[in-house]
Image (tube, rainbow, N blue to C red):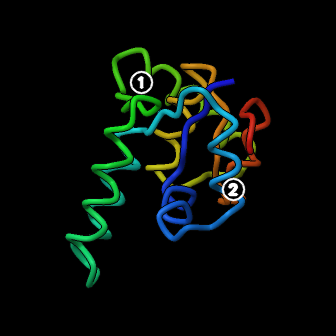
Amino acid sequence: MNIAIDTNALVDFFRGKTPIKFELQKHEKIYTPLIVIAELRAGFLCGKKGLENEKLLTRFLGSPRTEILLPDEDTTHHYAKLFQQLRSQGTPIPTNDLWIGALCLQHDLALLSSDKHFATIPQLILL
């Protein structure tokens, strides 16, 4: 199974957390949503280890097992349906995570994340 990785999971990976390393080793392909990359780089600019973290990200993205996942017009349909679903359920989630969820549903990917609010999307497989 191919997976997408959320920002918090990628930060944990960069910090060397063993459970994340083991989970990533299980998968042939790891998709990194463009939104995750933007969140990371924003964090790098606000932190004290920006250059060091940028090197880690560049190395991760350069792996042959990693691919950047870009939104497209089809993603907007998944986003809109997911937005409506979560609004109807009364369980909205942050906008960036809505985009990440939409990309995962569009490409039939499981999501590696520790954000609990993704559990409000029953059709999304969480790792």
Q: Going 38% across and 37% down the picture, which residue do you hit?
A: 63
Callout 2 amino acid: His
Q: Is residue 26 above or below residue 90?
A: above
In the rendered image, which residue does mark 1 sit on? 76
Q: Is residue 24 above or below residue 117?
A: above
Q: Is residue 72 above or below residue 93?
A: above
Query: Which numbered disc flags the more N-terminal residue, 2 or 1?
Result: 1
- Secondary structure under tag 2 reads helix
Q: Residue 119, which numbered label?
A: none
* Residue 13 spot, x, y in % from top left: 54, 60
Q: Nearer the viewer, residue 103 or 23?
A: 23
Q: Is residue 35 above or below residue 104?
A: below
In the rendered image, which residue does mark 2 sit on? 117
Q: Is residue 15 left or right of residue 59?
A: right
Callout 1 amino acid: Thr
Q: Is residue 120 left or right of residue 76?
A: right
